[in-house]
């Protein structure tokens, strides 16, 4: 799994700056602050943003321009789709550490012209830093646990902070401020997307059936809170979620308009025969580690139940009744109910349930189906999930250190009480925006953390390491380590492959990584240790260069 | 692999402080009060123009 976060951006004094140019500066500033040899660019080979999980692709000509996330590079994706007949090899115990079927590319004639804006940077922690639309985006490396999701998500905040500091230190660039949020209060929203690796055997219809009510109600635990109601914040007030007012459909392919609760983009960045990448766009950007932990952890557990059902487990009986009468209206209803006591109408003759009750059914179902088989990591997630629901029900004071929307609300209510402010006061809106400023001296959430008001999941030292080191137990390890060890040789890398240019090979060589669970330190550490240069690595993997 | 887990009640088997320290509601309230005491030094000087100028392009 992993998280992509588009950061809000402000910059320049006085005249408003072009946000795309500012975002490009952020990426370039980080690349400059953490210099390394080589000229690695992003590879778009597995990108297919118009493929729909319901089984079709939409035509480029009818797509909204904002859906063409591979614009300018679509031939790469098309070539890769056409050139990869059938499913690559399946992995098994006796097989080599990488399923190696090296593919070849012509060397570009003018490599320096390939990505002139250089707004796409691969990091040694396996992440991608780039400009998406008009925002700088950090796409975390693939991680295998919710705790690691927190770690590499917070590492992304450090990356953005380094870019901000670098720009501030230079007299030749405008100062830029970055915000880990999702709304500007003027009608614009930008996303924090979660990605989950799901067994392709799970029918997409089941994901829609069983995940919708879960996604709508998990907001009570993980919303980051928002001042203002309505897409432009036109009604004064406070709600649990940043994104709720921008969800307009139950199911759909779009992410920039008519945003759906369940997104159907079918772009697995992996072996499409075995895997689906579920792209969840309803979630908020979180500054609270506990929120990110529960967001990724609980969603993974619900999906794990659906996967278990494919292997013979029975989907919990109670889940059959968890169908909302009006999912989209419920997104907004949940977000606006600060009491957590309002019930939601269920489909058919179902008894109306509160969001907390629905979450209880999901947690109980996970325990029922997976209870004895859970890993230590997953068991910790389930325990945290159950305890957070208890706290929300019984002890709001204690919950405020762990539930982000509640913590933000307490700060806002505190200021309201001190100065008798109404909900439309600019100071309250300013607190909401500044909550997620990545600068620790300016970010309200960061200041609250310093004051002892925010629960931690990971340590500062661990976050610092995650800025440069990849997770060890996913293919991100190979991506990040290849870049760190062979910076001159890695000319491009994408989610599911690394392209090397080594002496002695007649062409560029692409090492595919169709399985996100492989390419790990355990599987490939010894192999890379044996090869101080990429040339001998490629030779061992089956290239033409003479073996040493 | 680390064995630390999020356990806000300060629970099981953690070593170097990954688990949040058990806290009383009073401590949590104190943190909010401390933050509010210094809020004017943290907030942008002109909240109104800051909020008005916070204009973003839509994204995904």
Image (cartoon, grey):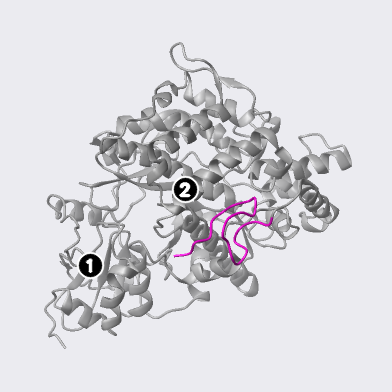
Q: Is residue A448 above or below residue A432?
A: below
Q: Is residue A217 above or below residue A140?
A: above
Nearer to us in this view, A266 or B8: B8
Q: Is residue A455 above or below residue A250?
A: below
Task: Give the magenta-colored segment's residue range.
Answer: B1-21
User: Please, which residue is most extreme toward the top here?
Assistant: A349
Q: What is the chain letter for disc 1?
A: A
The image quadrant that residue A50 belongs to is top left
Nearer to us in this view, A541 or A77: A541
Relative image position of residue A389 (x, y in whole percent): 59, 37
* Residue A107 falls left or right of residue A146: left
User: What residue appears at the point 31 percent right and 40 percent down from the top-left corner?
Assistant: A307
Residue bearing mark 1: A97
Residue A117 appears anywhere in the view:
no
How would you classify the magenta stretch by its main secondary structure? loop
User: What residue appears at the point 59 percent right and 33 percent down from the top-left corner?
Assistant: A231
Q: Residues within 10 Å of mark 2 (few under 14, many from 20)?
A: some
Q: Are marks 1 and 2 on the same chain?
A: yes
Nearer to us in this view, A59 or A338: A338
User: What residue appears at the point 47 percent right and 78 percent down from the top-left corner?
Assistant: A35
* Residue A15 falls left or right of residue A152: right
* Residue A49 falls left or right of residue A238: left
Relative image position of residue A220 (x, y in whole percent): 59, 35
Q: What is the chain letter for disc 2?
A: A
* SS at circle 1: loop
- The earlier-in-sequence mark between 1 and 2 is 1
Residue bearing mark 2: A379
| Quarter containing the C terminus of chain A | bottom left
Foreground tag (1 vs 2) = 2
Label 1, label 2: how far apart the Cα atoms are: 29 Å
């Amino acid at each position: 799994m992993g998280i992509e976060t588009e950061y809000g951006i402000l910059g320049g004094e006085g005249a408003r700056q072009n946000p795309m140019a500012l975002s490009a500066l952020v990426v370039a500033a980080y690349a400059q602050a953490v210099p390394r040899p080589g000229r690695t660019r992003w590879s778009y080979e597995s990108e297919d943003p118009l493929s729909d999980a319901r089984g079709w692709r939409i035509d480029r000509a009818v797509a909204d321009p904002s859906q063409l996330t591979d614009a300018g590079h679509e031939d790469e994706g098309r070539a890769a789709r056409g050139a990869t007949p059938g499913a690559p090899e399946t992995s098994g115990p006796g097989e080599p550490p990488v399923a190696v079927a090296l593919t070849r590319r012509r060397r570009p004639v003018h490599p320096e012209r390939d990505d002139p804006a250089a707004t796409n940077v691969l990091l040694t922690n396996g992440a991608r830093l780039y400009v998406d639309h008009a925002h700088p985006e950090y796409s975390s490396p693939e991680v295998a646990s919710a705790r690691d999701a927190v770690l590499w998500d917070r590492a992304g905040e450090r990356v953005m902070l380094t870019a901000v500091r670098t720009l501030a230190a230079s007299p030749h660039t405008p100062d830029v401020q970055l915000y880990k949020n999702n709304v500007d209060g003027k009608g614009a929203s930008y996303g924090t997307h979660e990605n989950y690796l799901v067994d392709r055997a799970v029918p997409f219809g089941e994901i829609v059936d069983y995940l919708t009510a879960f996604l709508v109600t998990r907001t009570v635990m993980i919303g980051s809170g928002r001042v203002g109601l309505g897409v432009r914040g036109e009604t004064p007030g406070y709600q649990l979620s940043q994104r709720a007012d921008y969800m307009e459909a139950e199911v759909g392919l779009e992410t920039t308009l008519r945003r759906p609760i369940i997104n159907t983009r079918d772009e697995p960045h992996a072996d499409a025969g075995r895997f689906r990448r579920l792209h969840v766009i309803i979630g908020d950007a979180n500054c609270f580690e506990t929120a990110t932990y529960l967001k990724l952890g609980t969603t993974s557990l619900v999906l794990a139940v659906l996967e278990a059902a494919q292997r013979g487990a029975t989907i919990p009986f109670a889940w059959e009744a968890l169908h909302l009468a009006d999912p989209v209206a419920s997104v907004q209803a949940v977000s606006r109910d600060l009491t957590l006591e309002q019930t939601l109408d269920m489909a058919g003759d179902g008894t109306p349930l509160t969001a907390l009750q629905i979450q209880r059914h999901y947690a109980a179902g996970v325990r029922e189906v997976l209870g004895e088989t859970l890993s230590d990591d997953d068991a910790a997630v389930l325990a945290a999930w159950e305890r957070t629901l208890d706290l929300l029900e019984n002890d709001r004071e204690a919950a405020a250190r762990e539930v982000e929307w509640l913590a933000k609300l307490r700060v806002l209510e505190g200021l309201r009480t001190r100065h008798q402010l109404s909900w439309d006061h600019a100071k309250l809106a300013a607190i909401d925006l500044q909550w997620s400023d990545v600068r620790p001296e300016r970010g309200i959430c960061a200041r609250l953390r310093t004051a002892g008001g925010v629960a931690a999941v990971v340590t500062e030292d661990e976050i610092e390491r995650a800025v440069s080191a990849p997770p060890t137990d996913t293919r991100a390890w190979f991506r990040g380590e290849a870049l760190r060890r062979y910076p001159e040789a890695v000319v491009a890398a994408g989610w599911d492959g690394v392209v090397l240019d080594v002496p002695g090979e007649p062409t560029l060589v692409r090492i595919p990584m169709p399985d996100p669970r492989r390419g790990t330190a355990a599987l490939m550490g010894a192999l890379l240790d044996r090869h101080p240069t990429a040339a001998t690595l490629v030779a061992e993997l089956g290239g033409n260069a003479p073996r040493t | 692999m680390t064995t630390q887990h999020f356990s806000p009640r300060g629970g099981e088997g953690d070593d170097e402080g990954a688990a949040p320290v058990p806290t009383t509601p009073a401590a949590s309230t104190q943190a909010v009060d401390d933050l509010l005491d210094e809020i004017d030094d943290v907030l942008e000087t002109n909240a109104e123009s800051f909020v008005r100028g916070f204009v973003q392009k839509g994204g995904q």
